[in-house]
Image: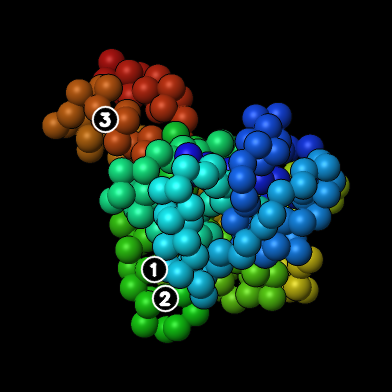
């Protein structure tokens, strides 16, 4: 069996009892960085052989894992932090197991994207995750173009020294909408800063410490006013039911569905 095991993104106590049991029982553990994972294993007194599997040797190591699985061994894979396959290696392992008909599963646990989606305070009924924006201008522009039509929460990862530049790109492309920057998630100095994109640019004029997550809603004003909501609902109610009009308006403006539904009923009954 191949186990893809989620590991802590900051607080070591977030490693689940099930994850500890699996890591303690497998024949070998593959990981992004053997030194980094070694600290985690030492903390929980887990003594298992480790092998590196990172972006630069993923294909070679995937073949090695497949061979071990075919020999009847149990293998675990962990990335440095969070869920393997989410902006980290892991997807190639799963695809290889599916191709070869080998047993594989996920041991769920921490994920910075999910934590940020909730902590941001932005509506999280639906959201899109884009990982790290490309640094090269053309693929970066193409990714921003793909984000542009969305009207729900978008989640990005970003290194601390590029946070302000990315916030500026988002402001230039999508206008001054609601956003949040989250850093040091689950750690002692966890920080969540919310506001408009322009306000966050001022707030992060100095480089923050630690990896960051940026959450925002493209194409939405920082504060959706009641007339904006009323105008949209009146237009929608000409062709849509109250329920459908409310659902569409809530999605576009990033507002709670119950609140929008109540307002839609009031407008319909006027």
Describe residue 248's horizontal placement relative to residue 196 as left or right. Answer: left
Residue at (77%, 43%) from the top-left corner? Answer: 46
What residue is pinned by disc 2? 140
Q: Which mark is residue 55?
A: none
Residue 68 place in picture, x, y as percent:
48, 52
The tag earlier along the polypeptide, 2 or 3, is: 2
C-alpha gap between disc 2 and disc 3: 34 Å
Kindly state the secondary structure of the residue where label 3 is placed: helix
Residue at (29%, 36%) from the top-left corner? Answer: 248
Quarter residue 198 falls in: bottom right
Describe residue 65's horizontal placement relative to residue 244 as left or right. Answer: right
Q: Is there a contact, CB below 8 Å, between mark 1 and mark 2?
A: yes
User: How many numbered marks are there?
Assistant: 3
C-alpha gap between disc 3 and disc 1: 28 Å
C-alpha gap between disc 1 and disc 2: 6 Å
What residue is pinned by disc 1? 144
Q: Answer few, some or many: residues within 10 Å of disc 2's Cα (few below 14, many 20 plus, some between 14 and 19).
A: some
């Amino acid at each position: 069996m191949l186990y893809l095991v989620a590991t802590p993104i900051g607080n070591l106590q977030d490693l689940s009892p099930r994850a500890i049991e699996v890591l303690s029982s497998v024949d070998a553990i593959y990981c992004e960085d053997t030194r980094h994972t070694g600290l985690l294993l030492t903390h929980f007194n887990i003594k298992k052989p480790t092998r590196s599997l990172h972006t630069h040797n993923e294909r070679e190591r995937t073949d090695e894992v497949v061979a071990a699985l075919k020999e009847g061994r149990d293998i675990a894979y962990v990335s440095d932090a969070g869920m393997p396959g989410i902006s980290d290696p892991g997807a190639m392992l799963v695809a290889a197991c599916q191709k070869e008909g080998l047993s594989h599963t996920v041991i769920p646990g921490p994920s910075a994207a999910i934590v940020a989606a909730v902590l941001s305070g932005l509506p999280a009924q639906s959201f899109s995750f884009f990982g790290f924006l490309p640094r090269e201008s053309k693929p970066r522009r193409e990714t921003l173009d793909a984000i542009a039509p969305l009207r729900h929460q978008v989640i990005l990862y970003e290194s601390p020294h590029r946070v302000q530049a990315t916030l500026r790109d988002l402001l230039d492309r999508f206008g001054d909408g609601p956003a949040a920057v989250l850093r040091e998630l689950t750690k002692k100095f966890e920080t969540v800063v919310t506001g408009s994109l322009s306000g966050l640019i001022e707030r992060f004029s100095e480089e923050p410490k630690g990896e960051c997550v940026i959450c925002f809603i493209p194409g939405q004003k920082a504060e959706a006013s009641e007339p904006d909501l009323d105008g949209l609902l009146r237009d929608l109610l000409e062709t849509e039911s109250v329920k459908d009009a409310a659902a569409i308006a809530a999605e576009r403006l990033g507002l709670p569905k119950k609140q929008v539904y109540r307002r839609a009923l009031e407008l319909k009954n006027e």
